[in-house]
Amino acid sequence: MRLDDIQSRAAWRTEDLTKDPDWVFDIDEAGAAQLARTVKAAYDPERELFDYTRADFDFGPAWDTLSQALREAHQGRGLALVHGLPRAALAEEEFKLLNWAIGLYAGVARPQGKASQYISQVRDAGVDYRAASGRGFSSNAKLDFHVDGGDLTTLGCYNTAKAGGQSMISSSLTAGEILRSERPDLYEVALQDFSFSRQQEETEDEGPFYTQPLFDEAEGRIFGKWNRNRVQSAQRIETAPRLTDKQVETMAALDEILQRPENMYTMYLAPGDLQIINNYTMLHSRTEYEDFAEPEKKRLLYRLWLAPPDSVRMPESWWDFYRAIEPNAVRGGIRGHNHDDVCKAFDARQAAELGMTLHDPSAAPTPTRG
Ligand SMILES: [Fe+2]
């Protein structure tokens, strides 16, 4: 598997991002004021998020900036950072609505866990990240390098931590290239299936774990997948295959490459920042953090997982988790235990508005593996 030119900008090293800030965007004051105005005009505490539509919001010129950033994350560097969302002008619920509204324009938001929530508050709820059902977004723990469960993740920062909570990003494409050149034997192992736990959030038609190689390809593009916590967690599931010594060695080699200073870009998100990540070319992580004592000052980010329009074909090995691999399809997410008719109606409405294909996620796969 070789990197194609098509993906070359996502195969960055830290110095590429430092030298060329083409992935950093600013919303100016007038743009931010317009965002605040349109959100405040639309905000109604009685209304469910699913009841808002694209027509409720007029982003003005700020949308040009946001759409460029989304394109950069989706088709360019794999990563984008937008400064200048109107954090100070908005209450917590209004800021949440702003993040949701950006998602309405950017794609079809996907559910993110057992509760089938379509937007997550990333905050410390005391969850044990290493438990069989643990999830990082509800803990204050240092996280392993991982991908999220949709093509794109947006993270809008409302509050930062008192200490820690640094964001780390490493390109899975770069790491794969290095692994292939330094340890071709382990790269071969990485092309074979690993088992990932569903962290007890599986829906009725899913097993407790799924398998994917760490690197696969489709139509000339390489797709990276990694999450040590879920791989280790799957080892507690009786029916999951045991890790081989070579797999364990591959995991260690990959994690070491990802964290080399020349490969790992670190940043602190500031209030009003929006980070956008491509989850098949980037891996991300964050350090442990300590919160302020006051509830209103605790670290808080709003997270969306998005299936964007004009997406590309995924490898067949990605079907089991994504439930659709075709270009421009609504795919990804963790449907969880509450993916009801209201969720399905939202998926259908957004898919229609964006001209995207919606498959029945519980139907059998169209492609066959192997
Ligand atoms: Fe994540």
Image: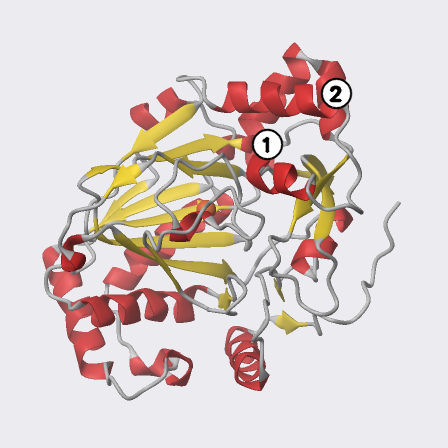
Query: Alpha carbon of mark 1 to alpha carbon of mark 2: how far?
Result: 34 Å
* Secondary structure beneath label 2: helix
Residue in the picture at 56% in, 59% down = 310
Residue in the picture at 50% in, 69% down = 115
Residue 337 visible in rendering: yes
Quarter of the image for residue 98 reads bottom left
Which x, y percent locates residue 171?
50, 31
Left or right of 357? Residue 66 is left
Quarter of the image for residue 172 reads top right
Residue 129, placed above or below residue 100: above
| Amino acid type assigned to the residue bearing label 2 in the image | Asp
Which x, y percent locates residue 161?
21, 44
Left or right of 80? Residue 90 is left
Residue 56, placed above or below residue 243: below
Residue named by callout 2: 245
Instruction: Answer whether labels 1 and 2 touch (C-beta < 8 Å).
Output: no
Q: Nearer the viewer, mark 1 or mark 2?
A: 2
Looking at the image, which is closer to me, 3 or 338? 338
Q: Quadrant of the C terminus?
A: top right
Please identify the residue farthest to the top as the structure is shown: 182
- First in sequence: mark 1 vs mark 2: 1
Which x, y percent locates residue 238?
77, 45
Residue 99, placed above or below residue 237: below
Question: In the image, which disc is placed on residue 5?
Answer: 1
